[in-house]
Image (tube, rainbow, N blue to C red):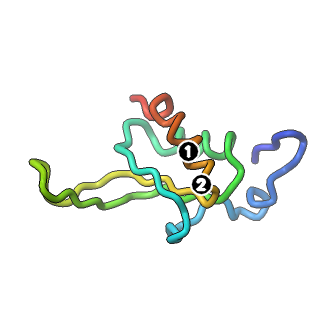
Amino acid sequence: MTVKNNQPNPLNIFDLREVKQCPPHFYAVDFDLSTNEKKITDWIYENLTGRFFLGDYYGREIGSSRSGSFLRKRAAFEIHSEASYFAMFLPDLNKF
């Protein structure tokens, strides 16, 4: 459990931060995973405060040379500004 500014996050205490299914109102960031998931979730727990989802996303690309379905990772956030913050740091986090 991470404590920032001497305030524990109630969502961490009750194990409610990471949701198992992505709700439709969460803002999603899709990416190809180059590192392990633990590095991503650790960064989210340390730097963000809201609820989030991290899991697989089966995308479909139509009209390009890469047609068909493919597997990517999706990080989705209840607080939309946290999704923007995560997307800014993702290139540094998602390194092999």
For label 1, count other residues whose C-alpha is less than 10 Å away and answer few (under 14), some (14-19) or many (20+).
Answer: some
**Separation of marks 1 and 2 at Cα, in angstroms:** 7 Å
Q: What residue type is labelled 2?
A: His
Q: Which amino acid does label 1 sit on?
A: Ser
Circles 1 and 2: CB atoms closer than 8 Å: yes
Q: Where is residue 31 in the image (x, y as percent from the top left)?
A: 38, 46
Horizontal arrangement in the rendering, residue 14 relative to residue 50 (left or right)? right
Residue at 71%, 50% (x, y): give it. 49
Q: Nearer the viewer, residue 47 or 29?
A: 29
Q: Position of residue 14 (x, y in %)?
A: 76, 64
Query: Quick check: 67 above or below 31?
Result: below
Q: Position of residue 32 (x, y in %)?
A: 34, 43
Residue at 52%, 36% (x, y): give it. 88
Q: Nearer the viewer, residue 86 or 12?
A: 86
Determine whether the residue tagged by mark 2 lies in a helix, strand or loop: helix
Disc 2: which residue: 80
Horizontal arrangement in the rendering, residue 52 relative to residue 75 (left or right)? right
Disc 1: which residue: 84
Q: Where is residue 57 in the image (x, y as percent from the top left)?
A: 36, 59
In which quadrant is the C terminus drawn?
top left
